[in-house]
């Protein structure tokens, strides 16, 4: 036995196409970088650390499967026939989690339950018109990238799935891509999570560029205060869930998961709250990030179809951020300048990331300005809006 067969991770670098070999090395280095940036809190550590580890390990741990092929024993996202799936479930160590939670969208619903249980509807119900208006403007990336994707050669389903990245709701992107572009959902989901983590770094610069410091630090004068009771929030949750499920049944799993979490929060069922927040939300997020990392295998991401997804995903998030700020300016003029336009970016529904980014940037401009309540209202509205739009796109796709 020679060294190439003894240390197969290195040996396979010389057995495969040079481009894939170089890409493997780059992905290993990129994974290490993401772990470092996550540990330093430059990027979201909850996602970046497990994702970076998975990416580095899967691209390093390629072995010789037989005389002609190489592969890994992490998971096989493409296996579909019964015999092959049963074999993979017994060999690949992450295959059971992938098959039973990831590839059917269950993990997205579990995360939505966790998001629901940490979501306070007070801000949304206190400022419903403002919140929903900002959320609609923050969907601009979805509406613009959809026709662009079709013009670039993607099918309507693929373009619609990629465009949902602009909604900045990664579990929803996973769910939508499974329904509309199952052949590309791995690449779309990986790109979505990578970009949403990078939004931590990019959105503050966009905010400073488009909103002058004097406006960014402006204080919103509260003209009314309304105390929303738990009973009112519980009624809204069950009514909104039922109505949305009637209107868009294809997205009912997402709606029911989100509003069930909210209902449990408002009912004060402590044991369920701890289960959903401490176990389901963080447990699902951990395994989702780890799975995404192991799906970042060089030969999968070097597919020529992935490049348009990379470009369109970035464009979708960028346009959505700009759209949210435009919405902030619209509300600013509607309210006769008694509003902070920076709040509009929180309509991009990465809860609570965008709301925290907005408050941090506003505080840098003026420490006395507190806009978090408006930002959270817009961000929570964004979650609902993105799910509704995704449901509509999926429904329309079924009839094309």
Image: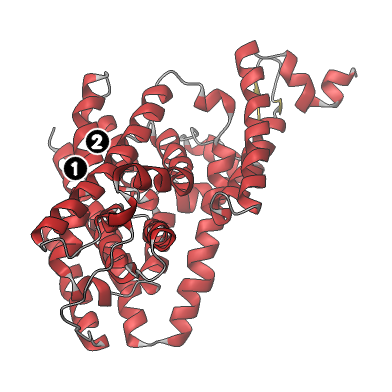
Q: Earlier in the sequence, mark 1 or mark 2?
A: 2
* As drawn, 291 above or below 351: above
At 21% across and 54% down in the image, what residue appears? Answer: 328
At 37% across and 62% down in the image, what residue appears? Answer: 112
Disc assigned to residue 25: none
SS state under label 1: helix
Report x, y in % for residue 175: 34, 48
* As drawn, 223 above or below 185: below
Label 2, on which residue? 160
Q: Disc 1 and disc 2: Cα gap in Å?
A: 7 Å
Q: Quadrant of the C terminus?
A: top left
Identify the image quadrant of residue 295. Answer: top right
Residues at marks 1 and 2 touching, judged by CB atoms closer than 8 Å: yes
Scheme of image coloration? secondary structure
* As drawn, 255 above or below 90: below
Q: Quadrant of the N terminus?
A: top right
- Residue nearest the observer in this picture, 40 or 260: 40
- Residue nearest the observer in this picture, 293 or 216: 216
Report x, y in % for residue 100: 48, 52
Would residue 265 be found to the left or right of residue 10 on screen?
left
Say whether residue 157 is visible: yes
Label 1, on which residue? 393
């Amino acid at each position: 036995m020679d060294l190439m067969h003894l240390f197969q991770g290195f040996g396979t670098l010389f057995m495969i196409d040079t481009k894939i070999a170089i890409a493997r090395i780059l992905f290993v280095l990129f994974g290490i970088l993401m772990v470092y940036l996550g540990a330093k809190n430059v990027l979201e550590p909850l996602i970046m650390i497990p994702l970076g580890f998975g990416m580095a390990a899967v691209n390093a741990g390629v072995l010789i499967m037989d005389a002609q092929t190489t592969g890994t024993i992490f998971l096989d996202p493409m296996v579909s026939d019964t015999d092959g799936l049963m074999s993979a479930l017994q060999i690949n160590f992450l295959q059971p989690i992938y098959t039973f939670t990831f590839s059917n969208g269950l993990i997205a619903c579990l995360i939505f339950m966790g998001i629901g249980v940490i979501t306070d509807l007070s801000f949304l119900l206190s400022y419903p018109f403002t919140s929903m208006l900002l959320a609609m403007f923050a969907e601009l990336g979805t509406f613009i990238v959809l026709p662009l994707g079709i013009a670039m050669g993607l099918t309507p389903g693929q373009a619609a799935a990629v465009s949902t990245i602009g909604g900045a709701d990664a579990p929803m992107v996973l769910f939508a891509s499974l329904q509309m572009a199952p052949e590309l959902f791995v690449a779309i989901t990986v790109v979505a999570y990578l970009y949403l983590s990078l939004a931590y770094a990019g959105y503050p610069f966009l905010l400073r560029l488009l909103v002058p410091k004097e406006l960014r630090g402006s204080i919103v004068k509260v003209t009314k205060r309304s105390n929303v009771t738990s009973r009112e929030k519980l009624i809204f949750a069950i009514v909104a869930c039922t109505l949305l499920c009637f209107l868009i049944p294809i997205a009912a799993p997402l709606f029911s998961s989100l509003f069930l979490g909210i209902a449990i929060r408002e009912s004060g069922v402590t044991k369920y709250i701890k289960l959903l927040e401490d176990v389901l939300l963080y447990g699902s997020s951990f395994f989702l990030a780890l799975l995404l990392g192991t799906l970042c295998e060089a030969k999968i991401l070097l597919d020529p179809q992935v490049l348009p997804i990379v470009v369109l995903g970035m464009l979708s998030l960028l346009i959505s951020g700009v759209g949210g700020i435009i919405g902030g300016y619209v509300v600013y003029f509607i309210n006769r300048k008694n509003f902070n336009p920076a709040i509009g970016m929180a309509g991009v529904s990465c809860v609570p990331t965008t709301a925290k980014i907005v408050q941090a940037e506003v505080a840098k401009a003026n420490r006395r300005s507190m806009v978090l309540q408006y930002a959270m209202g817009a961000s929570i509205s964004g979650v609902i809006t993105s799910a509704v739009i995704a449901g509509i796109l999926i429904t329309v796709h079924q009839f094309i």
